Amino acid sequence: MTLRVDVSLRDALLATHTFADRERVVVGRHASCDVVIENLALSREHAAIAWERGEWVVRDLGSRNGVYVNGQKKPVHALASGDVIGLGKYSLAVSLTGAHAPARKAAWTHPGAVAGAHLVVKRGEPTGVFSLERDVFSVGGHKSCELRLRGALAPRRLAMIVRGLGGYSLVNVSARAEAVWKNGKPVPDRCWLEDGDRLELLDVLARFAAGPAGQAG
């Protein structure tokens, strides 16, 4: 199993940490932490991401300013790929892969799974068809993004399309709720995707389509 943590400050991607076959990762400002964020808003050991009783969880280690998941304060929370942990002004986007990577439960029950998908970019730069084969497909101006936005105003990380056992979901990881839209409505946090959904990602207009990229219409 692999845990990836992308650390961002506002729209700027600062670092990417990948941990393979680890069951506990500590985040904080002390040099001994696995993910070090040198900021006084964080405690020396602020939070831990750990494999506990068959699921990944993030746990507040008694910090002063707390731990937030997808905008909600959570002392402990079960994680799924695409969740965004907030520590002070920093955002930690979590990607989970491997046999133990969970799908979102409870309120995130999806009406039906999608067997492969692709993104058809109709307006903006670049245009074309992008296969969504990875568990996490990133959109933004940083060179690590699968869909790399052009222009000086493009944030380094704008959004992610996350594949789970329930299907595909769209996650807004920017600092602006109005930067990501689905079917004419803003996506301030996260939403499920279905075949034919119309996505607006800043100046990019795209369509989410079920099925392999070879079936693009």
Image (cartoon, rainbow, N blue to C red):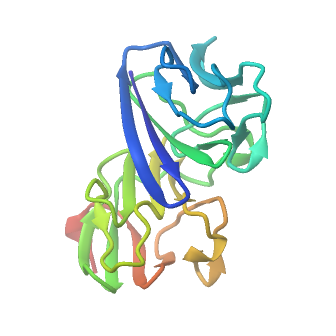
Residue at the limit of the structure toward the left, as seen here: 214
**At which x and y percent is residue 189?**
65, 59
Tell me what residue is drawn at x 48 percent, y 43 percent: 7
> Number of labelled discs?
0
The C terminus, quarter of image: bottom left
Q: Please say if 1 is above or below 72.
A: above
**At which x and y percent is residue 44?**
63, 21
Q: In this view, does 105 lie to the left or right of 75?
A: left
Tell me what residue is drawn at x 74 percent, y 46 percent: 107
In the image, 104 versus 112, the foreground residue is 104
**At which x and y percent is residue 150?**
30, 77
Q: Is residue 148 left or right of residue 8?
A: left
Q: Is residue 132 left or right of residue 25?
A: left
Q: Please say if 136 is above or below 201.
A: above
Residue at the limit of the structure toward the bottom, as seen here: 123
Residue 83, quarter of the rendered image: top right
**At which x and y percent is residue 62?**
78, 20
The N terminus, quarter of image: top left
Q: Please say if 170 is above or below 48.
A: below
Q: Please say if 20 is above or below 211.
A: above
In the image, 46 versus 105, the foreground residue is 46
Residue 68, quarter of the rendered image: top right
Tell me what residue is drawn at x 41 percent, y 22 percent: 99
Residue at the limit of the structure toward the front, as seen here: 40
Tell me what residue is drawn at x 48 percent, y 19 percent: 31
